[in-house]
């Protein structure tokens, strides 16, 4: 992981030099989350709040939606598109922290915070919904240390200490419940770690923040001793009581904090390692290697079988036997006069495949760039921002492939086809997101995309994506259509009655198993990142899984279309597209399983959000895998019919 961040830092430094060489007037250039920030002794270290999150409700809220102590002037950070879509609302807080300067206990607001009845109800509700508070210091998120001891009966304390397992939880819990009573974490013990940088002999030492931990506590107002200067002293743990929040009455609460600095040997380039090793990486390694080995083994077997069978078929078809044998031959050669017959609704098919090409190019570039470390979690919102812009700009490739295929399928209305390609899939995505956004608006959540951002996205869609799709479609439609090796007969051939296992739904179930098996382990980590506020960072694994997915989808598609043509059913265009996306059906089944077994969602709107966004994921995954399978099958069919002698 350290190597990845060093690579990212090196690439950013090189980019920096290039840009500065062009921009002579530029004095400084700072990439947030990548360039290290040096602090001197007693320099202010700003603590900012990001949002409140809960895996039970899936509705983020901004920090000051609850009655926390506020600074004199609230300043919101200018955010990128990804941060807005994620529901981040980064804002300053009143915590006063200086570099390498400890504080025992200090009161925020200087006076007890008076909670109205509505405030008390709201805080109690958020605590019952398991909300976490997310803060950042020098762009480093706060984490809560969790210690587990793997012990058995009879083991001594020394052995118990050696088997201690330390994990970190993102953010800190707003409070806790005990015997149906609600308690608020109103005291935060910040533990910040710094790394001392090497300096010249007479130079002033500089420090860099390398870890940000918090120990939340609940301390009753009456147990806190507060003086006139805003300083306080905490009671001993044995004699203190937690701060209860009674939702049926008004009350007063002290918000307090303490700061402790500790020196660390962790260097700045490795400071994210603590946050990114929260799950067992060994299990991940084993699972990925296991999936790769199984899929390569099955792929190898399939390839051997299909190549040997094809060689035998082609050799038989090319023999100059007597006329009687030729009349009695059966199999895929018999449908040579119909195999390239254009399907129904060629415009819709080419439009969906164009969107699939757009998705494929976007996913490939995003995963590759992220694998190099340029879209690390420290660059907040960069992954989503990059994905949105890349999808827009990949419209030129989607339009080109859709236009060329549409012409191959004897289409003539290229302008209508280009409009369909540019709007069909994005309109479905935008429509579902807009409906879900209305529900999020109703909950006053920060996850609701502002109206101005929606207008900006629409302008990007019609101002960037649509013209690029038209441009690509124009050149694709003008180019020569794909060269099919055999002519199409004027009269369609009659299709014989098909066996039960040639049914489309059976084909989807059969074709989806291998690609899904290649990536279902990775799917668990992706779902955890999306729905349980975890960091996802194993893009090297993801790139490997994506390659395996492409290979397995292609091979399964070729096998399925081969069986279909052997059964003398030449209607493969739509069927291959549908069947190749069969793994999307298993993704849907897995999403339902994950919802029931892993998430504790019971309310209507969180459930609606989960299944709404899952539907978009399944649709996008179907387009992606369907497109991969379709083009693999199309190339395969052109190859085999070019290899046989047709009278």
Image: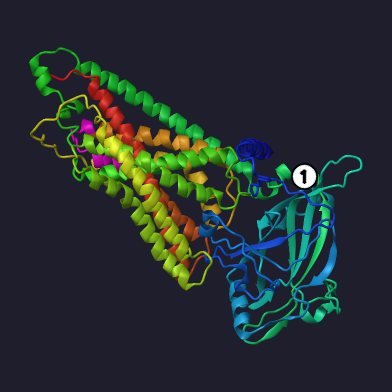
Give above or below for 532 relative to 328: below
> Mark 1 packing: few (<14 Cα in 10 Å), some, or many (20+)?
some
In this image, 626 relative to 261: left or right?
A: left
Instruction: Identify residue for label 1.
Output: 266
Scheme by which the image is coloured: rainbow
Q: Position of residue 85 (x, y in %)?
A: 50, 58
Residue 241 location, x and y as percent?
77, 77
Prevalent SS, magenta region:
helix
Is residue 591 shown above or below 259? Answer: above
Q: Quadrant of the N terminus?
A: top right
Q: Give the residue drawn at x 71%, y 42%.
A: 269
> Where is 568 relative to 65, above or below?
above
Asked whether, in this view, residue 52 is left or right of residue 520, the answer is right
Residue 507: tell me if it is visible. Answer: no
Residue closest to the far bottom: 249
- The answer to which of 548 and 453 lies nearer the viewer is 453
The foreground one among 117 and 479 is 479
Q: Nearer the viewer, residue 545 or 271?
A: 271
| Residue 466 image point, x, y percent | 35, 48
Tell me the magenta residue range. 565-579
Q: Magenta stretch containing residue 513, yes or no?
A: no
Q: In the rendered view, does 88 fall on the left or right side of 68? A: left
Q: Residue at x 52, y 44 (%)?
A: 522
Label 1: state its secondary structure.
loop
Q: Quadrant of the C terminus?
A: top left
Using the rendered image of the protein, determine whether residue 289 is visible from the camera's viewpoint. yes
* Residue in view at x 64 percent, y 87 percent: 249
Q: Is residue 439 left or right of residue 109?
A: left
- Residue 206: x %, y % from top left: 82, 48
């Amino acid at each position: 992981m350290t190597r990845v961040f060093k690579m990212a830092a090196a690439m950013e430094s090189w980019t920096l030099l290039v840009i500065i060489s062009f921009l002579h007037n530029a004095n400084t250039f700072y990439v947030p989350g990548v360039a290290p920030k040096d602090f001197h002794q007693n320099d202010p270290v700003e603590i900012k709040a990001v949002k409140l999150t809960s895996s039970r409700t899936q509705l983020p809220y901004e920090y000051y939606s609850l009655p926390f102590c506020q600074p004199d002037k609230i300043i919101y950070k200018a955010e990128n598109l990804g941060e807005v879509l994620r529901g981040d609302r980064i804002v300053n807080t009143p915590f006063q922290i200086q570099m390498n300067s400890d504080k025992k206990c200090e009161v925020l607001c200087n006076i007890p915070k008076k909670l109205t009845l509505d405030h008390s109800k709201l805080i109690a509700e958020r605590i019952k919904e398991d909300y976490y508070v997310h803060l950042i210091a020098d762009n480093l998120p706060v984490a809560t240390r969790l210690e587990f001891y793997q012990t058995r009966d009879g083991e001594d304390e020394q052995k118990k200490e050696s088997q201690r397992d330390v994990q970190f939880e993102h953010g800190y819990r707003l409070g806790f419940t005990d015997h149906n009573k609600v308690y608020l974490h109103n005291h935060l013990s910040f533990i910040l770690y710094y790394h001392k940088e090497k300096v010249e002999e007479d130079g002033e030492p500089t420090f860099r923040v390398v870890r940000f931990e918090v120990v939340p506590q609940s301390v009753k107002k009456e147990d806190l001793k507060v003086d006139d200067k805003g300083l306080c002293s905490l009671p001993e743990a044995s004699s203190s009581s937690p701060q209860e929040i009674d939702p049926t009455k008004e009350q007063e609460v002290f918000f307090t904090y303490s700061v402790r600095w500790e020196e660390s040997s962790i260097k700045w380039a490795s400071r994210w390692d603590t946050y990114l090793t929260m799950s067992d990486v060994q299990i991940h390694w084993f699972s990925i290697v296991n999936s790769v080995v199984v899929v390569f083994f099955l792929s190898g077997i399939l390839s051997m079988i299909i190549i040997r069978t094809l060689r035998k078929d082609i050799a038989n078809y090319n023999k100059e036997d007597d006329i009687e044998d030729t009349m009695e031959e059966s199999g895929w050669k018999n449908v040579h006069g119909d195999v390239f017959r254009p399907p129904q609704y060629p415009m819709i098919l080419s439009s969906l495949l164009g969107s699939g090409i757009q998705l494929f190019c976007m996913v490939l570039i995003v995963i590759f760039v992220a694998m190099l470390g340029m879209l690390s979690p420290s660059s907040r919102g960069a992954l989503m921002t990059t994905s949105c812009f890349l999808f827009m700009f990949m419209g030129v490739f989607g339009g080109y492939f859709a236009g060329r295929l549409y012409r191959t399928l004897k289409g003539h209305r290229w302008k209508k086809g280009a409009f369909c390609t540019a709007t069909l899939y994005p309109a479905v995505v935008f429509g579902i997101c807009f409906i879900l956004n209305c529900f999020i608006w109703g909950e006053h959540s920060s996850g609701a995309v502002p109206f101005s951002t929606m207008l900006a996205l629409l302008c990007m869609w019609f101002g960037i994506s649509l013209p690029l799709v038209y441009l690509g479609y124009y050149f694709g439609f003008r180019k020569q259509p794909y060269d099919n090796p055999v002519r199409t007969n004027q009269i369609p051939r009659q299709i014989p009655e098909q066996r039960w296992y040639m049914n489309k739904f059976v084909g989807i179930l059969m074709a989806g198993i291998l690609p899904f098996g290649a990536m279902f382990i990775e799917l668990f980590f992706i779902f955890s990142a999306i729905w349980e506020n975890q960091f996802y960072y194993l893009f090297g694994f993801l790139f490997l899984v994506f390659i395996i997915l492409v290979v397995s989808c292609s091979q399964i598609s070729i096998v399925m279309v081969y069986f279909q043509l052997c059964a003398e059913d030449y209607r493969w265009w739509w069927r291959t597209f549908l069947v190749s996306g069969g793994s999307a059906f298993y993704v849907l089944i897995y999403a339902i399983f994950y919802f029931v077994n892993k998430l504790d969602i019971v309310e209507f709107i969180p459930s609606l959000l989960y299944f709404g966004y899952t539907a978009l994921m399944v649709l996008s995954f179907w387009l992606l895998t369907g497109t991969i399978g379709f083009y693999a099958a199309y190339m395969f069919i052109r190859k085999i019919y070019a290899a046989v002698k047709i009278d």
